[in-house]
Amino acid sequence: MSEGFFEAIEELERMTREPSDVLEEMNDRLSARELQLVLVYFSQEGRDSWCALEVFEWLRKENRVDKETMELMVSIMCSWVKKLIEGEHDVGDVVDLLVDMDCVGLKPSFSMIEKVISLYWEMEEKEKAVLFVKEVLRREIAYSEDDGDGHKGGPTGYLAWKMMAEGNYRGAVKLVIHIRESGLKPEVYSYLIAMTAVVKELNEFAKALRKLKGFTKSGLIAELDVENVELIEKYQSDLLADGVCLSNWVIQEGRLLAMYICAGRGLEAERQLWEMKLVGKEADRELYDIVLAICASKKEASAISRLLTGMGVTSSIRRKKTLSWLLRGYIKGSHFDDASETIIKMLDLGLCPEYLDRAAVLQGLRNRIQQTGNVETYLKLCKHLSDANLIGPCLVYLYIKKYKLWILKMI
């Protein structure tokens, strides 16, 4: 370390002058590595952490924040957030730190709000996760409604999604309704998550009822009394009421499209897209892709054709995304002939389908060969994938039982 580094540390610790003034004066005497070490020094426990934030802010204003420095500061901030949560500090302190982070221009490539929710979740502090989301909404802290993959949305939607991932569908519904009825404004995407949770909970509830009826029929349990029947009916009606409540909020927000998407109603969703376009409310391109996938899963050929119109004038990245959604829709609907043609079309356009998508289509076609004996589509797809160097040589074999004959073909 140079003498300038130690002088800078000493001067900053005195706190007699603004950190920016000290750094401005010693700018020429400090290397990029030494400036990073200044950040690390003040990020340690017992040091003035606010000084580290001011040093970072000065670096940003001087355009001296490279990728490594940004990653270092993000790492420091994550460790501070984790210490606050592990130390059972007030939720407000965590939110304050996120506000400070935003003030100095620290913008990580991921959502810090989602990071905090995940930390609370991993530590089984689920009540605090809810309090944190409410505080973020109360203070109207900016957040990204799209994580880049087109899912989860903002804080409410992300927490509801975490609950759904654990199978707590009822909890996800109650969370969104509770936050809305608390006078806060959850992001619209959270309503879509909650409506999906209502559908999933109703499905699980129906399965449980069928099992219960089966046990009753076989004499394993006694017939349900009137009180239990009423409780079952009330639970079901409460769930449906929650669904209606959520759908009304969606309509109020002008998000009828989201309702159709949630219900898997492809044709209605497509019509809503065009109606929005006619009145000048162009929907996000991602929504067109989602509707395309829904239509593909039900093999709505006319709607698919309309939604693909104009794809040729978009960028190759955008084309790949759109065709990937189309492909996954066909896979979901088990339309493997169409899925195979979509993969071939992507290859012809110089686009590389995702590995899992390719594998799913090949698996689907293989299963169908066992049922129908039709190998043409499978062989055609293998040939195109082989030509694109996406699979190695493969041996295709077929046994004709009637003639006790094996047919082998190398591709």
Image: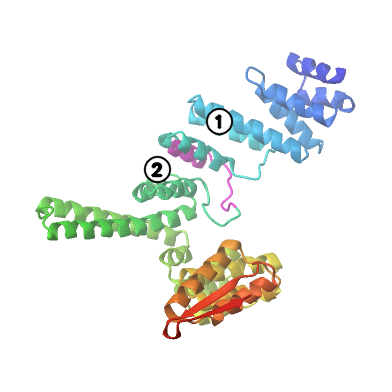
Above or below residue 52? Residue 377 is below
Using a 10 Å C-alpha cutoff, classify the residue at mark 2 as few (fewer than 14 neighbours), some (14 to 19) or many (20 or more). few
Residue 104 visible in the current orientation = no
In the image: residue 13, left or right of residue 296: right
Residue 324 location, quadrant: bottom right
Is 226 in front, or is 203?
203
- Residue hosting label 2: 182
Closer to viewer: mark 1 or mark 2: 1
The reply to whether residue 130 is visible in this rendering is: yes
Disc 1 crowd, CA 10 A, few/some/many (<14, 14-19, 20+) = some
In the image, residue 25 lies at what x, y percent?
Answer: 86, 24
In this rendering, position of residue 358 left or right of residue 183: right
Q: Residue at horizontal 76%, vertical 23%?
A: 19
Q: What kind of residue is marked 2?
A: Ser
Q: Position of residue 188 (x, y in %)?
A: 48, 55
In the image, 243 versus 331, the foreground residue is: 331
